[in-house]
Image (cartoon, rainbow, N blue to C red):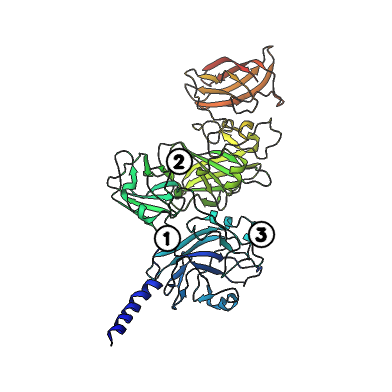
Amino acid sequence: MPYFLRFFTCLIVSVIPLVLTAQNRYDVVITEFLSDPTPAVGLPESEFIELKNRSDRDINLHNWSISNGNNSAAIKVDYILKADSFLILCASSAAASFAAFGVTLGVSGFPALSNDGGEIILSTETGNVMHALQYDKTWFDNDIKASGGWSLEMKDPSNPCSGIGNWAASISPDGGTPGKINSVNSENPDLDAPSLIRAIALDSINLVLLFDEAIDSVTASDPAHFSISDAVGSPEKASSISPFFDRVELRLQHPLTDGKTYSVSVNQLSDCSGNEIGLKNECRTGLAEKVKPGDIIFNEILFNPPSYGYDYLELYNRSSSIINCSELWVASRESTGNLKDPVRLVKEERAFFPGDYLLLTENPDWVAHHYPNTDESVMIPMSSMPSLPDDMGEIVLLNTSTDIIDELDYDHHWHSPLLSSESGVALERIRTDLPTDLASNWTSAAAASGYGTPGYKNSEYSTDTAAADFISVEPKVFSPDMDGYQDFLFIHYHLPMAGFIGTISIYDIYGRMVRKLVDNILWGTEGSFRWDGLDEEQRLLSMGHYVLIIQLLQPNGTIINQKLVTVLAR
């Protein structure tokens, strides 16, 4: 063979692979998909995924695969995706229908896309993830379009890592724009720094860090960018986790200690758009312990929301242990005593730290809008909630072994009688150390708090405990005006023995009895009663001094009499 032909042949062999091989993640991206084609608007009644070659070279898609997270299908032909061009992927049976809209490639075994939400993963012939999405119906931001026939389109292909913020329902009359520029196409650069959401301790030396978006794999693989408090220091190894790259796995040099909470911090970490992490670069972590009865309690409940609203349940960790939320389930209890429809809080591990709150609801957006002070980071979106009747019901918190952790048998009569309407008003626990089934330890959320404090300290919260005397009251001055501050008078008791039968009568300064608060009932050795400032007819009493006459009698002849004074103010 002449020399110049040998040279030309070598040139072809060396150039073609460079032209037809993808070099960088996101060279090819998913720019549109139709997961629910029924009822059809103007597109074929079949699912499709649209790809775009963002690079400046042609790329061979031979043996690339498309997956829904469970099933995948490979492209078995040599297909050259031209630079800056689109390709419609669909089932082989639908290829002819989509061909009228643009260049189409039918794929045998095309994976089904979930209507409600799921994953789409595009991988190269070597198994490297080129682009991946986790979508759900909220991306539509339109209930009608979310019900079927409309595609989801990417706004800005140069911003492939952003999730819901870079996607929208198609505005094309056909319901989508397969094979061409999207109807919602616009500049939408990613200008936001990534945030560290939480850290999961898989065991004493392995952590997984979760971020709110995909992280650059190069910066995520440098152990010097991570640090754990209490002399644990930087890990010996760090690596990003595919297919979404929003998680980083750390292998520690020094193990974590049981029962201890650590701080994890990251620095000089970037997202795939080059934005470096900012102030939201720290979170807590620690080894979780097995949850025990009473560790987690029901702390607030909204069971009668407005007609357009949603129920919620608030949990509080009153223990000193870190609890794994994946251990926890909630259920209602039927009149027969059987548990009904248990629902798991989360499928993946999530730490619940001592003194923290968790808020369970089907619609976090509604709760955050209706109660603006809500901490959205403590919300857990539930696919479904146990039944919470508007009048009364029984709700149970249990672990995976079905041990009862806490149980609340609520009644709408626990609400303040001063309320004009119970709709949209949450019931709050007053003290976390008292039993859950103590009716006097629950009351309506204060008006000043918007009638609910989901995910943060209750408006009627109290930490006061009984004094050294057998019986005491707090506060000395109370103002039952539902402003969230000292709305109730609490009568605490610590008795020397069990078996007392007791009465509490309340008198005004003229010696007239205005309320029989407790009438000859059996008291425990310790507990509390609550006065709401109302008389026997449930009318609010006038401001002034009131005298509490307390009489206790035990069958063995032991008698306790006590007179206490309080002030009802405004």
Q: Position of residue 385 (x, y in %)?
A: 57, 49
Q: Earlier in the sequence, mark 2 or mark 3?
A: 3
Q: Position of residue 37 (x, y in %)?
A: 61, 68
Q: How many marks?
A: 3
Q: Compared with residue 121, is residue 466 higher up or lower down, i.e. above or below?
A: above
Q: Quadrant of residue 409?
A: top right
10 Å crowding of disc 3: few (<14), some (14-19), many (20+): few
Between the C-alphas of marks 2 and 3, the distance is 44 Å
Q: Which residue is mark 1?
A: 243
Q: Quadrant of residue 284?
A: top left
For image coordinates 50% across by 55% down, the residue present is: 162
Q: Quadrant of residue 182?
A: bottom right
Q: Which amino acid, mark 3?
A: Ile
Q: Earlier in the sequence, mark 2 or mark 1?
A: 1
10 Å crowding of disc 2: few (<14), some (14-19), many (20+): some
Q: Which amino acid, mark 1?
A: Pro
Q: Which amino acid, mark 2?
A: Pro
Q: Compared with residue 381, is residue 40 higher up or lower down, i.e. above or below?
A: below
Nearer the observer, disc 2 or disc 1? 1
Q: Secondary structure at mark 1?
A: loop
Q: Which mark is residue 293?
A: 2
Q: Which residue is mark 3?
A: 144
Q: Secondary structure at mark 2?
A: loop
347 with respect to 251 (left or right): right
Is residue 393 visible from the viewing direction of this image? no
Between the C-alphas of marks 2 and 1, the distance is 38 Å
For image coordinates 65% across by 43% down, the residue present is: 305
For image coordinates 33% across by 53% down, the residue present is: 221
